[in-house]
Image (cartoon, coloured by chain):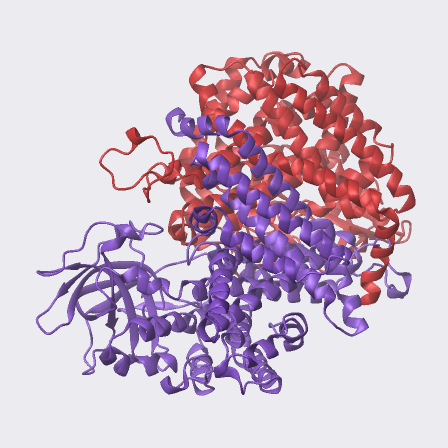
Chain colours: A red, B purple
Amino acid sequence: MDYRPRPEDSRFILNAVLDAPSKLRALAPFAEVDEALQQQVLEEAARFVAEAVAPINRGGDETGCRFANGEVATPPGFRAAYQAFVDGGWPGLSAAPEDGGQGLPTVLEAILYEWLSAANHGLTMAPGLLHGAYACLKHHGSDELKALYLSKIATGEWLATMCLTEAHAGSDLGQVRTRATAQADGSLRVNGGKIFISGGEHDLTPNIVHLVLCRMHGSEVQAPAGPKGLSLVLVPKLLPDGTRNAVHCERIEEKMGLHGSPTCTMRFDDATGWLVGEPGRGLAAMFVMMNAARLHVALQGIGLLDAAWQKADAYAAERRQMRAPGAVPASRGSEAADLIAEHPAIRRILDTQRAWIDGARTLAYRSALMLDVAAHDADAKARERAQRWCSLVTPVLKAACTQQAFHGASECLQVFGGHGYVREWGIEQIVRDARVTMIYEGTNEIQAIDLLVRKVLPDGGAAMSAVLLELRDTLDASRDADADVQRRLAQLRYLGTTIAMAAQANPVLPYEVADDYLRAVMLAMLAWAWARIDAAEAPEAERAARAGPAAALRRWVLPEFDMRLAIVKRACEGVAMTHHAAKTPAAAR
Amino acid sequence: MDYRPRPEDSRFILNAVLDAPSKLRALAPFAEVDEALQQQVLEEAARFVAEAVAPINRGGDETGCRFANGEVATPPGFRAAYQAFVDGGWPGLSAAPEDGGQGLPTVLEAILYEWLSAANHGLTMAPGLLHGAYACLKHHGSDELKALYLSKIATGEWLATMCLTEAHAGSDLGQVRTRATAQADGSLRVNGGKIFISGGEHDLTPNIVHLVLCRMHGSEVQAPAGPKGLSLVLVPKLLPDGTRNAVHCERIEEKMGLHGSPTCTMRFDDATGWLVGEPGRGLAAMFVMMNAARLHVALQGIGLLDAAWQKADAYAAERRQMRAPGAVPASRGSEAADLIAEHPAIRRILDTQRAWIDGARTLAYRSALMLDVAAHDADAKARERAQRWCSLVTPVLKAACTQQAFHGASECLQVFGGHGYVREWGIEQIVRDARVTMIYEGTNEIQAIDLLVRKVLPDGGAAMSAVLLELRDTLDASRDADADVQRRLAQLRYLGTTIAMAAQANPVLPYEVADDYLRAVMLAMLAWAWARIDAAEAPEAERAARAGPAAALRRWVLPEFDMRLAIVKRACEGVAMTHHAAKTPAAAR
């Protein structure tokens, strides 16, 4: 069974829960993007994903990418599917019309990519990097570079990469050694090696545009050590005159999953490139699209979890094993055993994942809307508020949604029993594919540090408090569920203050509890999302179908909130002891 | 880096924590098995595992088993390694000397198999099934069958399988359809198909002895429907006269991992077999070794987690990325970055897994000791107490240790960043291999139901209370850590009573909270184990090295205990509501 997007599910969250249509229409570029057009785009996207992308997922995993003589062959069907993607105008869905894009809201593109990832994570990696490259070039590229590359990237005619990681420089980009040396004609000579480059080489497009993080060398600019010395350089596979540039793929990785996406080791041997943005401001140039890129990974997580849930839900509705305690006899008929969907342990797994999917979608779609607001709202204050939301919520979604993708998909695998462990059913592929999302685009541990240490604590928790208060203001305290969420939001605000105070005595403490803090934020926000879902208008049958996931959230998911609070509080109370403990392990080993 | 057993770690738990040598010497068959002999066996086992088994693990995953024309070729090196295993007398370590075994305690065999699984889970599957088949045949086989098969199995000269699962009968063995028809000569004709048969066909031994769960057909015995109608039949690949029996492998599964072990679909076409035990008592005959088999799976989990920890710990002690907050400057030297082992998020991952490994080992080795006591103690009361421990603690260890193997190995993968996702480092193989342990030998959900519904509740929690009180009596309430454990054990006893009462109003409730109950039991027992570890005599350097894991247990692991308690209590309090919710989901879908 291949993944099938269910546009009605996403539309309910977009329209009924988030009131997206009216919010989008208030933004000048989307004044004409009415609900009917949005619906049409989503329906067509769903059809494209189901028909062209999902069916080649399994083969993509089994055949994988093949490397020979510096070239990479993508799995059967990938070229045709990607060409159809380009022909349909999908790569440029949110790109500016003047660059050949469709000029549609980011939030629609977010949903498209959630579905694409759910249907075929490997194939989706290829265009998934386009949007960052486009934004980066659009904001920082010279007019000459833009003229040559911007529309090619916007339309997906040429694919793009982000070349950051080196063997010794993973999370620590300050250690990057690839060198760019200025030439008399204004171009750069790039030398060095990069690893883990998704789509570094492939047969999907004739040209590939690499954005390479380098250290500048040369007479005028000498790069200092560390991240401040890094510059961003555009290095195309084919030079503007059509000749082959000296950038080559040396090998591709054998990985746990994601076999449909080539992970390349790249060599730059006097390759020709051009600076994007200011020298020494390479990280800043890349980080312009970091929130969008991390949200994209969160959506991969949501999509993969939905794909796993779809498979498990369908299997549980057909497979019969043993008598289920409390099963409704009418469903049994003449069968000797009950549907496994009726067994409480299976019900719990399925409803819990559904609670995560719908809650996380609400938060992720809201974040995508905020990207639209941040880019297009006429009111500077509104743009600032939206930016604040994105800055604080994106790392939360990236870490929590990808963790749930892996762990939740593994739970869905469990629904299949032994059948889940064999390839045939495709569920184990989802678990393998999902695992990488916890690592790339900043490991989940780094997301937690980004959130707490770099964003929440520096202003004493003021920005995070403002976000939490905004959420509180959407609630109606006369509703029980809303009052419960309000309580959690208040607890979170207090928690931020508690950590800030403890951190004064022990600066290591925030690094130790960053994961717990992030989890607590996610769980409170999930509770908020479900309060909004619960308050949204929906037909009775739909409301009834949400009763199981809503109960699962309350009974099985949210208790972790109190646990995380307790962990952080105890750590803060024991600051003196903690400080001592943090000093000992390394010495004691 | 291949796995290397560390016998000193296991010996510390066996001797200093569990006082195993004196306990074993009190059992008649082990009166001569002194500490020196135990140590020698473990040292030799460690050497064998490190030299012969660990180095072919990676190749076993990459090459996997190959199926062609009904035959299965195991990966390169597997035959030689298995032959060395047989030649060393390892298969019969705990088998009776009269059957060609070494007559050593089960607890030593448990440690051997923990290490084997850690070093090469795929290869270890082959002999891993011998012990169940040996026990089954020894207890239930006719003299004639024993004469033909018992010593061959005890010595590992022939390997054995357990043929239970059928396509429509996984967790629900009552649905088994394979038929055994009585013949005039006392033999049986077996017809049917089985799936997921580990080692159903291979090239490791000339003969393979299948123990097949069948439904009897024939003039005298007509099997009733359900599990009561099942019988156990021995079907050898080669008949006693050397001719080929009509049992064949049709294909092997492509799996997520465990590629070194062939998972076979088997056909029985008028195959000849002989009854083992009474007709209709097949499940009882198999369940005689269920506690040992499930403990074996728990030990696989512990071993795989230890293997993952070893890799991550070694990597973290070499890899440098960024400045670590709170790092000891002396460790930095002239390096631009600190060891990742000094980063709090990595420290937390490593220490948490270490806490699980040592705590779970303490409980698993204690269980293995209890198997020895249950089999050999002169005192019937002592045997009964040991049996009670095994019955109640085995499902807890099976579920909790295998879950931690998968999730903890995934955490260890995270330590490697992007390198963890590529095959090269071998850590992703551990995650894939570990996943199956949550499924086979009874899914973890079934373990939880077995514990709570089948074992704890029927006597109102009396047996579990007795086990918890036994643990309490080993503690010294004047020690803070011990008092904390006592509190948890008391809470658990109360929890059992709470569930028993709520179950009277809602019989579905125990099925809903069985996982939480099992987790709470495991966490309290982990706390007990670490209190014992803490109380054991050890050199100061070793004590210091355990400070990190001990703190990790207290800070990051045990808070889940309170969460599980809260989940169960709330479910019990809301019994009326729960009852309603359990009735709705199926109807609402």
Q: Is residue A472 above or below residue B122?
A: above
From the top left corner, tell me how far across and down residue A561 is, in percent: 67, 36
Q: Is residue B417 left or right of residue A333?
A: right
- Which quadrant holds the N terminus of chain B? bottom right
Residue at (36%, 39%) from the top-left corner?
A: A324
Tally of numbered discs: 0
Residue A460: which quarter of the image?
top right
Residue B15: which quarter of the image?
bottom right
- Which quadrant holds the C terminus of chain B? top left
Residue at (41%, 86%) from the top-left corner?
A: B97
Residue A467: which quarter of the image?
top right
Q: Is residue A339 above or below residue B4?
A: above
Q: Is residue B227 visible?
A: yes
Q: Is residue B35 left or right of residue B86?
A: right
Which residue occupies the foreground of this view, A531 or A428? A531
Which residue occupies the foreground of this view, B343 or A219? B343
Residue at (65%, 33%) from the top-left corner?
A: A523
From the top left corner, tell me how far across and down residue B164 is, in percent: 31, 59
Q: Is residue A271 visible?
A: no
From the top left corner, tell me how far across and down residue A232 is, in percent: 77, 45
Q: Is residue A335 left or right of residue A586?
A: left
Which residue occupies the foreground of this view, A169 or A267? A169
Residue at (25%, 50%) from the top-left corner?
A: B226
From the top left corner, tell me how far across and down residue B530 is, in percent: 69, 61
